[in-house]
Image (cartoon, rainbow, N blue to C red):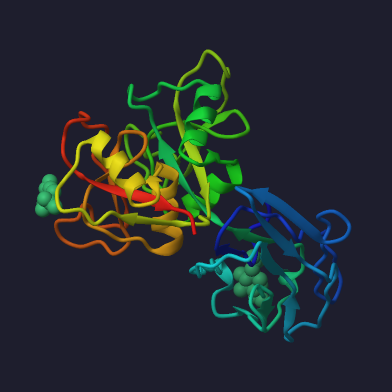
């Protein structure tokens, strides 16, 4: 993970985009140097939506005690219709930093009361997506690397990168089952150290098994789902449905049965909250809760899972329709 300095992590829609890397400069000033590709512009393709993150001013300096603006903008191509929630992780800069937000997509960071030790390099990350753990209906630790890749793709997602998992961990993801990441390493995120999850002697963090054999070793997967172009919704239907009926009902409604990636993206990025268990395309049954409440699972928000019930069991269904 790159520097964790004023981290403008914006949970918007797509990916983790390193944009503004710089070299530390020392002196009686403050510098911000964008080295990402010499021009300060990065772009990334994902699911047909194109996220641009731009940082136009490679080097910024100011005097001690004054304020400085670290420029960063993002935009989508094509423009997205659904509004996104924005979350910012200020870390140790809380109270001294704010987003400028002078225009839509302006993620420029204003730091005030500059200190000498603010000198350094910063980067602007725009994160548009959600990391979720995924395991097979055939059981835990079923996937080799290629299987994990395919499983995420079937869920309308990709294998998560280390940076994505790290950010998810910073935001509270705690998962005691190891999963493949895109770089071929196997890791898992722990926010509350405990026995059986690396033990209590280790602090909170990502537990890594390092690189594992891509064909021979088997684990779960950490997938990353990006923003949705359409909407995920719980289908209004007069009765509960078997798995087969659920798929048909979504088609009849003009969509298709939602994937796990889609329900996670709907939950995390658009605030989908529904205390009704519903079928998903992989044969699992889940429901998304953004405001935890009694009788809707644990005390934290999350996508609750009933695992993979028999296909003739009756539940609701989550559908996805493109807009
Ligand atoms: C930076 O300096 C301030 C005092 O000017 C100090 O309180 C703070 O802990 C220092 N931060 C780091 C990361 O060294
Ligand atoms: C579907 O089943 C759940 C319990 O499994 C029940 O609470 C709900 O009322 C049922 N919905 C319909 C439409 O029958």
Does residue 123 appear anywhere in the picture?
Answer: no
Left or right, 231 with reference to 16:
left
Q: Residue furthest bottom?
A: 66
Whether residue 43 is situated above or below residue 224 in the rendered picture: below
The percent position of residue 27, horizontal first and vertical second, equals 86, 71
Left or right, 306 with reference to 253:
left
| Numbered-mark total | 0
Answer with the quadrant where ligand 1 appears in the image. Answer: bottom right
Does residue 25 appear anywhere in the picture?
Answer: yes
Whether residue 154 is situated above or below residue 172 in the rendered picture: above
Residue at the image point whose x is 54% and y is 75% from the top: 94
Residue at the image point whose x is 17% and y is 31% from the top: 312
Whether residue 125 is situated above or below residue 27 in the rendered picture: above
The percent position of residue 135, horizontal first and vertical second, equals 38, 31
The percent position of residue 215, horizontal first and vertical second, equals 56, 15
Q: For residue 290, what is the image quadrant?
A: bottom left
Q: Residue furthest top?
A: 216
Left or right, 243 with reference to 268:
left
The percent position of residue 155, horizontal first and vertical second, equals 46, 38
Viewer-nearest residue: 126 or 65: 126
Left or right, 107 with reference to 292:
right
Residue at the image point whose x is 16% and y is 34% from the top: 313
Q: For residue 251, what is the image quadrant?
A: top left
Residue at the image point whose x is 14% and y is 49% from the top: 239
């Amino acid at each position: 993970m790159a520097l964790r300095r004023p981290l403008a992590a914006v949970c918007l829609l797509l990916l983790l985009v390193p944009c503004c890397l710089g070299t530390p400069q020392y002196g009686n000033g403050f510098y911000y140097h964008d080295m990402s590709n010499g021009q300060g512009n990065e772009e990334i393709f994902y699911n047909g939506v194109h996220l641009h993150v731009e940082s136009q001013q490679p080097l910024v300096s100011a005097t001690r005690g004054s304020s400085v603006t670290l420029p960063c903008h993002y935009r989508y191509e094509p423009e997205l219709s659904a509004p996104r929630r924005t979350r910012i992780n200020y870390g140790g800069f809380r109270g001294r930093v704010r987003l400028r937000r002078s225009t839509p997509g302006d993620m420029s960071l204003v730091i005030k009361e500059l200190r000498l030790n603010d000198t350094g390099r910063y980067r602007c990350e725009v994160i548009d997506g959600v990391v979720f753990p995924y395991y097979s209906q055939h059981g835990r630790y079923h996937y080799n690397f290629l299987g994990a890749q395919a499983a995420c793709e079937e869920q309308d997602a990709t294998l998560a990168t280390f940076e994505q998992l790290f950010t998810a961990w910073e935001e509270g993801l705690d998962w005691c089952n190891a999963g493949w990441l895109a770089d071929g390493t196997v890791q898992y995120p722990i926010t509350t150290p405990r026995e059986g999850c690396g033990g209590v002697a280790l602090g909170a963090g990502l537990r890594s098994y390092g690189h594992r054999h891509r064909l021979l070793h088997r684990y779960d997967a950490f997938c990353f789902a990006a923003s949705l172009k359409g909407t995920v919704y719980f289908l209004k239907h007069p009765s509960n449905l078997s798995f087969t009926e659920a798929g048909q009902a979504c088609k009849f409604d003009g969509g298709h049965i939602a994937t796990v990636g889609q329900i996670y993206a709907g939950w995390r990025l658009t605030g989908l909250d529904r205390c009704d268990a519903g079928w998903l395309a992989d044969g699992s049954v889940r429901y998304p809760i953004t405001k935890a409440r009694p009788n809707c699972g644990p005390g934290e928000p999350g996508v609750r899972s009933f695992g993979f019930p028999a296909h003739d069991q009756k539940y609701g269904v989550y559908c996805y329709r493109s807009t």
